[in-house]
Image (tube, rainbow, N blue to C red):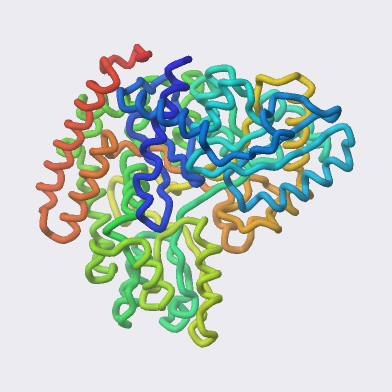
Amino acid sequence: MDRSVVTAIGMEGTAYKHAHTRMPVISSVFRTRKHHVDRYALASIRADKWPLSKRALLIVLYGFVSACSADVPKDPNIAPHAIEARNKIRVDLTVWSAQYEAAFKKVAADYEKLHREVEVVIETVPSQFYLAWQQTQLVGGTAPAIMQSHWGNLWGKNGLIICWDDYLNRDNPYTGARWADLFYTENIDYLRDESGKAFMLPFDLVFTGIYYNKSLFKKLGVNTIPRTWSEWLRDMDTMRSAGIIPLAWPGAGGPQLQWIAKMLFDCLCRDKFAEINQRRTHPEIPYPLLSDPEYGYGEVLDGEENAVAFSNGILDPLKNPEFAEMARQFKRLVPYWQKGFNGADGGEVFTLFLTQRAATMLDGTWDLIPLQEAIAQLPPQDRFEIGLFRVPTLTKGDSPFIPGAFRDVGGPGGLKFIITKKMPPERVKWAVDFVQYLTSTDVAKYVFSHTKLMGPPNLKNVDPGELFAMFKGVPIVKMEGYAADEQSLDEVGAYFQLFFEDELTLDQLLERWHDSYRRGVERSKDEWGWDMNLATLEE
């Protein structure tokens, strides 16, 4: 088996690192593109740059045992999927995003009425088993026709799934229009592998933003949504003066620190992207202006590129003033957090917001429905209307280092379709056809209107809903390498907590940040065999 396939299982061990927090983590890039098995994970994988660690090999063994014992469907008429036991052509779709199950089953029934020769089966596999289960099915040739997956670039690299590109460039038979034109194609492009192929087709998106109490905003006279960093601080001054916590903050757990850090880093260090990105995916395409929100799209910075950039002084907290600026700007938010913020977890933040002691909180689109349901359970006199706005951006008036506006933490992190390659061509054809039907405008409208959404659809003609409309076509963070590896990320987060509490000076923070990055680079070189020569790829 190809090492890059095996290594996918190795990543499962990090999937629930933040399981103690209420909110899921949107993953960071250290070694390469890391993935959480969690249903909200983001992204694509540079499989060819993932060497195998000893720990990964142990998890492979565990993963295959888990896959064999996973709580998956046992109906003998359903499994194994590769056996055609009936006269009808079987198209099975397996997901872990259970919120879609009822709508998908209704769509499947309607599809079967159109195509009597096809049987469509919708199944759900628990997320905690999904990665190991999916690999076992794909490698064994028993995979369902269509699956949800965050690891399509790994499976595609090993010839296990189809590439979507040829199909996307054809007309969708249910709309008569070019299929790709139905999508926000920038999210398809975001997931392409290093060769430029699209192995994953994103159906929905997730984003992060600021939830706010509309009633409190109106009462305090905050009548417009802040768009810039300075406007945001001004409005939070108003809230603080009224005795309201402006921004509830989970210092003891949760990914919010990483989200703000990513946005600041991507904004402040964007002008270093081209210098770091020595392994161009598309060297034939010139970079746009730095002010272009899609600057860097189609390219991926891997862990070794970031490590070389650190060693060359391009990404060094002690040598690059952008790191100090990132820390200074982040600390400007601290006066607006609740007392004891470093001891608060996501649950406490949720409670502060729900009880109207805090006017805002930073969270993901996936928590909209739980939040609305929690508010609906309050006594009538305690209920309030919520809104959502994007994290306000730094501007040149805030900082001299700004090459462009903030890009959001989010993107194609929910349901992404892949199609198994190891099955008869006729079955592949019908699998593609069902996804075309599912993503046709009228059918997709039905699905999204009958599903508790975790984010906006990735389809242009489908209403994302009032609160999610702001995320249509927004640019996504591309630079995330402010720490060298997972351990370094944790260390830097702890240093920031001390800095926020004035237990570290800015100079001390930068020194520890530099040392943590250096140690992370050395660990990475030892663990993954990096030779720090970007002209080579470690196998």
Where residue 113 sits, quadrant-wise, is top right
**Residue drawn where x is 37% and y is 71% of the image:** 235
Residue occupying the far bottom of the picture: 381
Judge left or right: residue 121 versus residue 282.
right
* Residue 192: x %, y % from top left: 54, 28
Which is nearer the eye, 11 or 354?
11
Which is nearer the eye, 335 or 75?
75
**Residue drawn where x is 24% and y is 33% of the image:** 315
**Residue drawn where x is 48% and y is 76% of the image:** 223
* Residue 142: x %, y % from top left: 64, 25
Where residue 450 sits, quadrant-wise, is bottom right
Which is nearer the eye, 338 or 19?
19
**Residue drawn where x is 54% and y is 69% of the image:** 372
Judge left or right: residue 502 versus residue 297.
left
Task: Pick the quarter of the image with the C terminus.
Answer: top left
* Residue 25: x %, y % from top left: 40, 48
Asked if residue 274 can be seen in this view, the reply is: no
* Residue 11: x %, y % from top left: 40, 32
Q: Is residue 376 placed above or below 96 in the rendered structure?
A: below
Judge left or right: residue 163 versus residue 375.
right
Where residue 209 sits, quadrant-wise, is bottom left
